[in-house]
Image (spheres, rainbow, N blue to C red):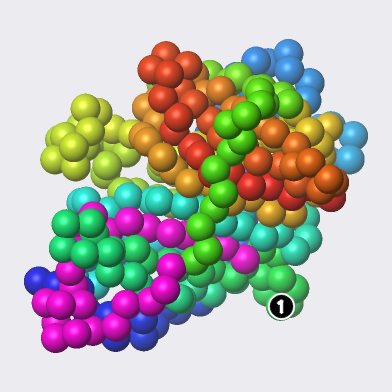
Amino acid sequence: MAIDYHHLKNRAFAPVHQHYTERDTMLYALSLGLGNDPLAAAALPFVYEGMPGGLRALPTLAVVLGYPGFWAREPDTGIAWVRLLHGEQRVRWHRPLPADCAVVGRSRITHLTDKGADKGAILIAERRLETEAGEPLATMQQVTFLRGDGGYSQQRGGQPSDEPLPALAPTPQDRAPDCTDTQAIRPEAALLYRLMGDYNPLHADPEVARKAGFERPILHGLASYGLVAHALLRQCAGGEPARLKALDIRFAAPVYPGETLVTEIWRVPGQDGQYQLRARVAERGVVVLSHGYAELA
């Protein structure tokens, strides 16, 4: 059954109220591998409440807060959910995240683009995260490739197809990165990251992963997004989470738990605080995150 443009664009999402605690903040950081080295002092403020100044939240914690769940799997969507992939993530932070806070996530579908019967469709969901008092924390855009749902506009009698978001720029090809960061991904990373609220079996069940075309369960795109953000903070922001203001990335290829992620970062000439970045898997030599753009205060 083809997806219905009007149904998806008008689909109502109830506000998601969530009170996350310091335990949740620490668990998120641990799921990304912070604390793998018990002597790495720079990681302690994100996983241990006893540091001077107290516990700090990684800014990318925002992407798992106020999350409406794996709604694409619900029958009313018509989405071939087994074949969907998280294509891009774009986030703007409005203020630093507290380590303990009551928040509200407000989601809506802003774009649905038909690429053609053999090319799939693109769905963009926006989520605004704010405190219960209404203070904005972050605005997120999740770009999802619906690989099994292309051609819907023709199948349903000429339904609309939205213009996509402006394309992200590729990283420089004419010069080496200004800095590089290497981090190992734990073998159980995907199983840990599921505890953040994304229970898509693609990240846990080998049979589901094979049906989707992967040799084994893959790491969540948002987990690799968090890894790259932390690499950027380590290399360019002195580990200071409040300095991250924007991060856009394209998920170019799957990441498997147990691999080694190498993040390459370029400063944008003449633009203070702006960076381009990508990440590759050392063992396979494959670029897995591309077209990255970041802003630091």
Q: Residue at x 67, y 32 (%)?
A: 265
Residue 283 screen position, x and y as percent: 42, 14
Query: Tag 1, which secondary structure?
Result: loop
Read off the magenta span.
139-164
| Magenta residue check for 104 | no
| Magenta residue check for 140 | yes
Q: Residue at x 68, y 16 (%)?
A: 38
Q: Residue at x 42, y 73 (%)?
A: 163
Nearer to us in this view, 13 or 81: 81
Q: Is residue 61 left or right of residue 186?
A: right
Amino acid type, mark 1: Gly
From this view, report whether residue 19 is shown above or below residue 207. below
Q: Quadrant of residue 11?
A: bottom left
Q: Is residue 207 left or right of residue 279?
A: left
Residue extending farthest right:
52
From this view, report whether residue 119 is shown above or below residue 134. above
Q: Quadrant of residue 100?
A: bottom right
Residue 59 screen position, x and y as percent: 69, 48
Q: Quadrant of residue 96?
A: bottom right
Q: Residue at x 38, y 76 (%)?
A: 162
Q: Is residue 27 visible?
A: no
From this view, report whether residue 280 is shown above or below residue 243. above
Residue 120 screen position, x and y as percent: 24, 59
Q: Is residue 265 visible?
A: yes
- Mark 1: give few (<14), some (14-19) or many (20+) Cα within 10 Å: few
Mark 1 — residue? Answer: 134
Q: Is residue 153 left or right of residue 111?
A: left
From this view, report whether residue 246 is shown above or below residue 213. below
Nearer to us in this view, 20 or 155: 155
Residue 296 screen position, x and y as percent: 79, 47
